[in-house]
Image (cartoon, rainbow, N blue to C red):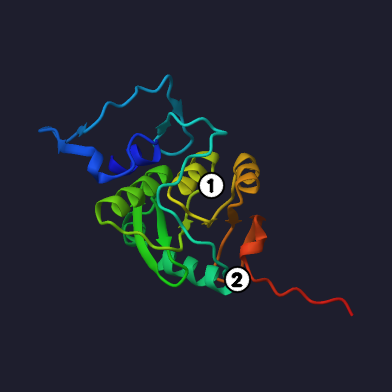
């Protein structure tokens, strides 16, 4: 819930939370803030297994709170991070049918989260960053879920410069990544990936013409 409120732009830090409780029946979370929160004019149902919602417009660029430095990566680093993501999928190996996302600094996985809904995995990571005060200077998001525009927006909100997925990006997420300068990678495996936007962050060695 904390990460969802963060990614929706309702709060920026834990200092804005006065109290948070799970109701006695365990099916609702109550969050009290230290300030008034404006009720969204409308909610949009997002694509995905659990039919999530967002109040962020599909073409709105969220303001990042976690600032990430500019950096470059070798293609092999992406492949290694994808392998680390696959190896971290404990719940998936037990049950199947869940998504996994991870936050990386380019060398290791800092946080990972699993959920039946791919959007929820990014909300969980955002919440963990806030609650544990985790602020890596390099921010790379790797996920098993399809990168929709909502997924890309959540990544931008978290300050990610690179967003990579095991599967495909949507056409709108590619357009937004190009406009916002986010390196977007799809069909990432242990030995290959497709690059869709902002290739300048990857140190690619193309053959020089003779």
For the N terminus, the quadrant is: top left
Label at residue 75 = 2
Q: Mark 1 and mark 2 in contact (Cβ < 8 Å)?
A: no
Instruction: Say whether residue 28 is left or right of residue 206.
Output: left
Q: Counting residues from the N terminus, which is met first, the one under dot 2 or under dot 1?
A: 2
For the C terminus, the quadrant is: bottom right
In this rendering, the answer to whether 120 lies above or below 102 is above
Q: Residue 97 at x, y = what percent?
A: 40, 50
Residue lying farthest left? 24
Q: Residue 138 at x, y = what percent?
A: 46, 63
Give the class, few, some or many, for how many residues have Cα within 10 Å of label 1's Cα (few <14, many ≥20). many
Quick one: SS at disc 1?
A: loop
Residue at 49% x, 61% y: name it: 69
In this rendering, the answer to whether 137 lies above or below 196 is below
Give 143 or 20, whichever is nearer the viewer.
20
Residue of label 1: 147
Give 162 or 26, whichever is nearer the viewer.
162
Give 201 or 21, whichever is nearer the viewer.
201
Label at residue 79 = none
* Mark 2 vs mark 1, CA separation in Å: 20 Å
Residue lying farthest right? 210
Residue at 43% x, 49% y: name it: 158
Quick one: SS at disc 2?
A: helix
Instruction: Say whether residue 56 is left or right of residue 196.
Output: left
């Amino acid at each position: 819930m904390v990460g969802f409120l963060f990614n929706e732009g309702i709060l920026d830090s834990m200092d804005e939370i006065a109290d948070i409780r799970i109701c006695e029946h365990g099916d609702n979370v109550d969050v009290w803030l230290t300030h008034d929160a404006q009720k969204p004019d409308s909610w949009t149902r997002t694509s995905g297994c659990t039919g999530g919602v967002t109040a962020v417009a599909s073409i709105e660029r969220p303001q990042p709170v976690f600032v990430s430095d500019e950096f470059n990566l070798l293609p092999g680093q992406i492949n290694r991070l994808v392998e680390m993501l696959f190896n971290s999928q404990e719940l998936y190996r037990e049950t199947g049918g869940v998504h996994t996302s991870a936050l990386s600094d380019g060398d290791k996985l800092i946080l990972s989260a699993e959920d039946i809904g791919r959007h929820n995995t990014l909300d969980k990571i955002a919440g963990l960053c806030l609650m544990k005060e985790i602020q890596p200077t390099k921010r790379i998001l790797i996920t098993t879920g399809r990168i929709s525009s909502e997924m890309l927006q959540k990544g931008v909100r978290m300050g990610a410069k690179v967003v990579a997925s095991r599967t495909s990006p949507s056409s709108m997420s590619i357009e937004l990544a190009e406009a916002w300068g986010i390196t977007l990678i799809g069909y990432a495996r242990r030995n290959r990936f497709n690059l869709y936007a902002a290739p300048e962050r990857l140190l690619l060695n193309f053959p020089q013409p003779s």
